[in-house]
Image (cartoon, rainbow, N blue to C red):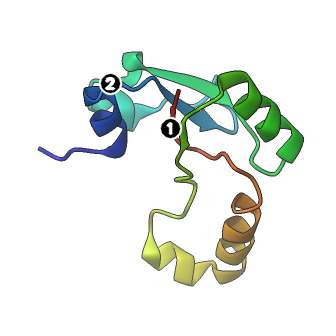
Amino acid sequence: MVLTLPKLLLRREYEVWGTSRDAEMVSFHNLERRGILNQINTVSLNLRDSAQTFRLIQQLRPGEVYNLAAHSSVGLSFEQPVETIEHHSRSGQSSGGNSPYRC
């Protein structure tokens, strides 16, 4: 069994939040396939909007923040080097991400 970060946090009884640019339109099929989608709170968040990110962090007041908004494919990062650099540099400017929060 693969124990992903969200599963690990849920096992430890964390309140887990996940973000996506458009959470209402995203299927989150990986979370659904793992049987944990109904245990994770999802919210829309644009990482490039630092004010929105700050407001969300103020609202949730998480004890921990994990930014998992990186390319999941090493091959893709080599195929799209400019986009990869822009993505990592911009996502590093904010404290949140497409990530679970523990509150």
Name the residue located 52 percent from the left edge and 53 percent from the top edge.
Answer: 68
Percent across and percent down for residue 19 are 60, 35
8 in relation to 48, above or below: above
Q: Residue at x 80, y 38 (%)?
A: 54
Nearest the viewer among 23 and 19 is 19
Q: Residue at x 44, y 68 (%)?
A: 73
Query: In the depicted view, which residue is nearer to us: 28 or 44?
Result: 44
Residue found at the far right of this picture: 51
Residue 61's disc number: none
Disc 1 residue crowd, few under 14, some 14–19, many 20+, Cα 10 Å: many
- From the image, tell me which residue sits under label 2: 36
Find numbered disc 1 in the image and state the secondary structure of the residue it sits on. Answer: loop
Q: Amino acid at mark 2?
A: Ile
Left or right of 2 on screen, residue 88: right
Q: Quadrant of residue 88?
A: bottom right
| Residue 49, horizontal then vertical, whole percent | 85, 45
Local crowd at mark 2 within 10 Å, few (<14), some, or many (≥20)?
few
Disc 1 residue type (three-letter): Pro
* First-in-chain label (2 vs 1): 2
Q: Is residue 32 left or right of residue 87?
A: left
C-alpha span from label 2 to label 1: 12 Å
- Percent x, y of residue 59: 73, 23
- Give the residue pinned by disc 1: 100
Mark 2 secondary-structure assignment = loop
